[in-house]
Image: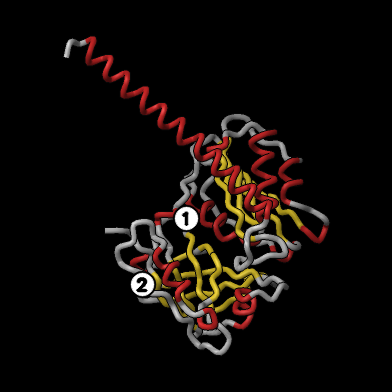
Amino acid sequence: MGQALTVSYVQVVGVERITPRTARVTFTGDALAELMEDRPDQQMKLCFPRAGQGVPRLPEPEADDTYGMRWYEAYLAIPEPERPLLRSFTVRGYDRRLDVMAVDFVLHGDGGPAARWGRDARPGDVLGMVGPSSLYARPLPAADWLLLAGDETALPAIGTLLESLPAGARALVWAEVADAAEERPLVSDGEVSVHWVHRERGGSLPDAVRAARLPAGSGAAWLAGEAAAVRALRRHLVEERGLARKAVEFSGYWRRSLTQDDAPTEEDLAWAKEQAKEQAKEQAKEQAKEQAKEQAKEQAKEQAGE
């Protein structure tokens, strides 16, 4: 049996403006109790209704789905005028006692479907949801210290990652926001230092991290946000700071001047090709290690006279 991603409906039960440009929307849904896991950085997709629809039309994936992508085939089969608009989000929190999920909406001025919906969200509104699933969990690399960097879109994940750290764990956070009014509390049992970067003052995430003094010892990083900034940060940490490539988890959540509906750019394709090469190298290394282990076992057997 495969591991199909669950497609379900969620309904708004509350809306709170936690900063001038961020709305926290809480949802309930019949499938939440089964889907939500006790782990940070749970990724999922929300399905927004088309104009004239009160409730989005959802795809109906097959139950036997080895790679968890049949839902997307069913999604594309929906006629485009009725097909819901998809956007990726991170679960900010889940209260199992109340069976309520919190999701933060960044209210960009670009008029995108998620920002428009988030500005006008009211209790009783209904969206679709694909996932979340542990198939796409990204465990943090083991290290003496952890660097977390991202913009507003990454703050929900950063918040959950910090909350998952045990006492004594060391983390450094660089968070890029529009201005001081967009800062928010970040809670952790670990030893955390938070550095806010304000765009209104000309600050940028890559510049702030480049200028930072990092601790001694082994480091790991988690990066997310605007794709070009994430690429620049990863190259800096790997090529100039000496972090191992496998110690840097990263994700481009959005692209400047483009949406998730737009085709990939030449830069996106070049980056994807580079990533594929790196993954192929890592896989080749792992295969070589496994082959070496098997050869060592065979030699040991021969020497033992088996």
**Which residue carries the number 2 mark?**
31
In the figure, is residue 9 to the left or right of 151? left
256 vs 168: above or below: below
Mark 1 or mark 2: which is in front?
Answer: 2
Across and down, in percent, residue 25 comes to: 54, 74
73 vs 167: above or below: below
| Residue displayed at 69% across by 70% down | 108
Q: Nearer the viewer, residue 101 or 115?
A: 115
Across and down, in percent, residue 21 comes to: 69, 71
Badge 2 density bin: few <14, some 14–19, many ≥20, Cα 10 Å: some
Across and down, in percent, residue 159 comes to: 56, 57
Q: Amino acid at mark 2?
A: Ala
* Mark with earlier residue (1, 2): 2
**Which residue carries the number 1 mark?**
40
Quarter of the rendering containing residue 144: top right
The N terminus, quarter of image: bottom left
Quarter of the rendering containing residue 196: bottom right
Across and down, in percent, residue 252 comes to: 61, 54
| Residue displayed at 51% across by 56% down | 160
The C terminus, quarter of image: top left
Coloring applied to the structure: secondary structure
Dot 1 falls on a residue whose secondary structure is loop
Q: Nearer the viewer, residue 140 or 293?
A: 293
Q: Nearer the viewer, residue 284 or 222?
A: 284
Residue 217 seen in the figure: yes
Q: Amino acid at mark 1?
A: Pro
Residue 171 seen in the figure: no
In the figure, is residue 228 to the left or right of 306? right
